[in-house]
Amino acid sequence: MKNKIYSFIEIARLDKPIGIYLLLWPSLLGYVLAGINSDLEFKNFLIVIFGSILVRSCGCVINDISDYRIDKLVKRTLNRPLALGSISLIEAWLFFLALSVIILGITFGSGSIIAYSLESNIFSVSLAILYSGIIAWIISFDTYYAMEDKYDDEQIGVNSTAILWGNNSIIYSKILHIFFYMCLLTVGLINSFSYLFFLFFLILIYLFFRQSKIIKEENYIEAFKINNWVGIVALASFTFEIIYLG
């Protein structure tokens, strides 16, 4: 029974929360940005956190259901519960449906726009800019993640941006990451953030160069994980400017 419970934890990746964080930070950026136009409610903050955990877990389960045959052929994924057989396909589907029902029950979806809409129905140019940047950021770090499995994916015919972009994968990912930074900077300028915001931005620049160094060492998973700190710093800068100073 204990092993079965742990297998469900594994298939939802609750033992590897980096994916939850990388869904949570963009959502909370949208939530905090809404504080420019309205007072933030703590219950909505909890909804964003709870929803991010559920949405990411659902995504992981349905991903493993779709790819369990492929996962058996990829070195990094061959020990996932479905590929290993510690959870049956029927059990995985039932688990996915249970998680989906909870999400539908609180009428919550992922993303900065939905988190923003929990607090404000006022259209914001800042939100549009932030959302554009977040899309670029997600594609960027997802490409680094895909680089880790590039060889296996090529052998079994699975496509990804790492394969699609070929030798340009790293440079395109860096361009997208820089675009995300420019969007954050633009939001700061539009809303007249204080000079302290730019101190946070210096930390983001440091993290970009730190990530670039790790990429040169071809340690793509660690480069991917750096984005957790990018999200934390970006969120801290928005929180400080909008909630604390605002």
Image: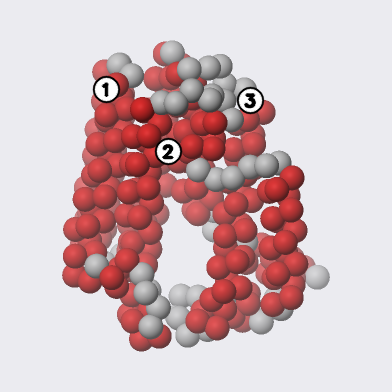
Tell me the mark number nearer the camera, choosing from 2 and 3. Answer: 3
Q: Quadrant of residue 217?
A: bottom left
Characterize the local packing of mark 3: few (<14), some (14-19) or many (20 or more) Cα atoms within 10 angstroms: few
Q: From the top left corner, tell me how far across and down residue 94 is, in percent.
A: 75, 67
Identity of the residue drawn at 26% across and 25% down: 198
Mark 1 and 3 residues: CB-CB less than 8 Å, in contact? no
Q: Quadrant of the N terminus?
A: bottom right
Near-viewer residue (150 or 16): 150
Identity of the residue drawn at 74% across and 75% down: 90
Rounded to the nearest whole Å, what is the CA distance between mark 2 and mark 1? 20 Å
The reply, left or right, for residue 197 in relation to residue 168 is right
Near-viewer residue (34 or 197): 34
Mark 2 and 1 residues: CB-CB less than 8 Å, in contact? no
**Residue at label 2?**
232
Q: From the top left corner, tell me how far across and down residue 187 is, in percent.
A: 32, 27
Identity of the residue drawn at 74% across and 45% down: 105
